[in-house]
Amino acid sequence: MSNKAFASQADLEEKKISWEKLSDNAYAYTAEGDPNTGIIIGDDSVMVIDATATPVMAQAVIAKVREVTDKPIKYVVLTHYHAVRVLGASGYKGEGLEQIIASQDTYDLIVERGQQDMDSEIGRFPRLFNAVESVPGLTWPTITFQGEMTLWMGKLEVKIKQVGRGHTKGDTIVYLPSQNICFSGDLVEADAACYTGDAYLADWPQTLDNLTAMNFDKLVPGRGPALMTPEAVKAGLAYTRDFVSTLYRSAQEAVAQGMDLKATMAHTRKNMDPKFGQVFIYEHCLPFDVTRAHDEASGIRDPRIWTAERDQQMWHSLQA
């Protein structure tokens, strides 16, 4: 274990891109467990949901969009603040970008910890930051909202909403009421581990219940394949709930028994490995997940800020 490559530094294999049409207005850009991007095509413009990790990587998304429309990409919505989701936003500037939209909670997190998160994530996951030198700096929203906002793209109504805390406190979904299609960001994953290093694990299951009650027919998760039927949507929500609940319950049991972080990791693995050991980015996420779960179960309500230095310290303490 001791020589295991840090986080996902050994993950160098390129992923196969899928471009799926959900409706005449909605597409999913997915990549075998890498971060997904959503596309909404309105009457007069295009919205991109989550902007990829670098402006150079955004070009691949733009190329797919341009296969189906030449309308300007006016809007980028950030479902949360993580660097791998947002640092590519500047890549859309030449495509008509007018507004970058995020929740006020997400804006506040960028102020508080955006730079540390950026440095930390680039160190963890080099393949996902292809051409990182093209990133001009942090991505700042130009419009923020609290709770919910509605945007009209011509006659197409787009809802942008917070349904509760989970993956972060700023989590935002985007949905089309007329078509019952949702882009969930990392509140929901499919066939991929949930990264919970900045999560509110006690809140997350209720947030998923709130999402389940909205009865979406199709849903694009943060990672994994687009969920194209109501049954697949329910399964994705249930899978995510099982992941975060098993993780948090394991940490609560460990803390109740006075276990340190390393013992908590071993206890959690007994519960998690048989169910989730094979899914995308499981080994990358688990040390960060267990660290946050142990913190929250110990009464640390708000996630501590990850820095590149803290990442390495945690990793070595768990692998030692």
Image (cartoon, helix red, strand yellow):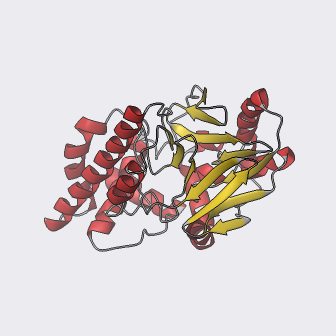
Taking the image as shown, residue 316 lies to the left or right of residue 97, namely: left
Q: Position of residue 278 (x, y in %)?
A: 34, 32
Question: Closest to the observer: 298 or 146?
Answer: 146
Q: Is residue 191 visible?
A: no
* Image point (75%, 28%), residue name: 68
Taking the image as shown, residue 277 lies to the left or right of residue 80, namely: left
Q: Tell how many labels.
A: 0
Residue 20: which quarter of the image? top right
Q: Is residue 305 visible?
A: yes
Q: As displayed, is residue 147 above or below residue 56?
A: below
Question: Closest to the observer: 180 or 317?
Answer: 180
* Image point (38%, 48%), residue name: 212
* Image point (20%, 45%), residue name: 271
Q: Position of residue 230 (x, y in %)?
A: 41, 35
Q: Position of residue 279 (x, y in %)?
A: 38, 34
Question: Closest to the observer: 108 or 316?
Answer: 108
> Dividing the image into 4 quarters, which one contains the N terminus?
top left
Q: As displayed, is residue 279 above or below residue 7?
A: above
Residue 141: which quarter of the image? bottom right
Q: Position of residue 214 (x, y in %)?
A: 43, 50
Q: As displayed, is residue 268 above or below residue 39?
A: below
Direction left: furthest residue: 257
Taking the image as shown, residue 147 lies to the left or right of residue 91, namely: left
Residue 317: which quarter of the image? bottom left
